[in-house]
Amino acid sequence: MTWGCEDLSAAIGATATRDAAGRYLSVFEHARVQVLLAAKAAGVQAIDGVFTDLQNSKGLKSECAEGLQAGFDGKLSIHPNQIAEINAAFTPSHQEIADANELLALFAENSGAGAFRFKGQMVDEPHVKRARAVLARADAAGVSLSPALPSGNIQPAPQSSRPSVRPHHGKWFEELSEGLIIQHALTRTVTETDNILFTTMSLNPAALHLDYNQAQATEFGRPLVNSMFTVALLVGMSVLETTHGTTIANLGFDEVKFPRPLFYGDTITAETEVITARISKSRPTQGIVCFEHRAFNQDGELVCRARRNALMKCRPSAL
């Protein structure tokens, strides 16, 4: 979960987002904190917003450090030159990793003690959680978690130590039983920008999507959202809970229908039903699944239905 300071400033009519010292004005700091707390309450990553001053690397470094201390898990980058600075800020040092390992080892030795002394300070369960979070960030960054490593520059873990199955949210073939219906978590309000960008990028000159005057003369009285964007959005919204990290290829669509038009400002929710699922005859470790994706507007009206065939991975034998 993240937030857009500049978008918020435009929405509320603000003339500035930061004070003379570079700190967020109170209304924007309030929004930033609310996003952080909401993300943590939902159990998802909290990603801090962009730092727009491309020439101020010191300011970027300081804001990354402050964001990490506050609890953010990362920060959006607005330019490639910012990536290294952000990665360095959110990647634990070897000293931090060593301290976390030492604290957890001491915690294991004092199991049931509730609180114990560590480097002259009283520590308890919250400190243990923070230590585990440090190791989790290090693992996600590909840094060795061994406490025996010397301090110094961060060294990537050997490739052989990386997990053979990368983290994923999708389902293995065996989990996709016929008749299964999945309600998707992601939702999206469609904007005029979405429609114009998609239509022009795909070289579609249809006035129905681009020309307000001509669109007003149609039975709809306004521009329609490009239906190819609608189906692309629907399939994208379905990926997280169905095929993320578990698909091999999209084999094609059997049927795509648009029962109702989609307009700017409509909010889309989606669901997917497994229509058929069978093991591939030529690839016995893979399966072919027919998904029916369905998109609904804010009034619960069906605006798109698409049947899609996907080649899916079977669950690895090691899992």
Image (tube, rainbow, N blue to C red):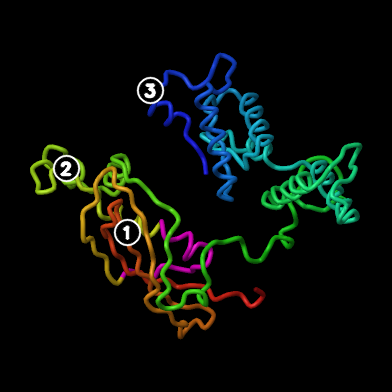
Residue found at x 36% / y 55%: 269
Q: Residues within 10 Å of mark 1 (few under 14, many from 20)?
A: many
Instruction: Please provide the residue range marked out in magenta.
Output: 237-253
Residue 224 or residue 198, whichever sits in front:
224
How far across and down, in percent of the image, does residue 157 sit?
A: 75, 54
53 above or below 48?
above
Choose the circle earlier in sequence order: 3 or 1: 3
Choose the circle earlier in sequence order: 3 or 2: 3
List the residue tagged with mark 1. 295
Determine which of the numbered discs, if any, sits on residue 222 in the image. 2
Residue type beneath disc 1: Ala
Choose the circle earlier in sequence order: 1 or 2: 2
How far across and down, in percent of the image, does residue 39 sit?
A: 56, 44
Q: Residues within 10 Å of mark 2 (few under 14, many from 20)?
A: some
Residue 221 or residue 203, whichever sits in front:
221
List the residue tagged with mark 3. 13
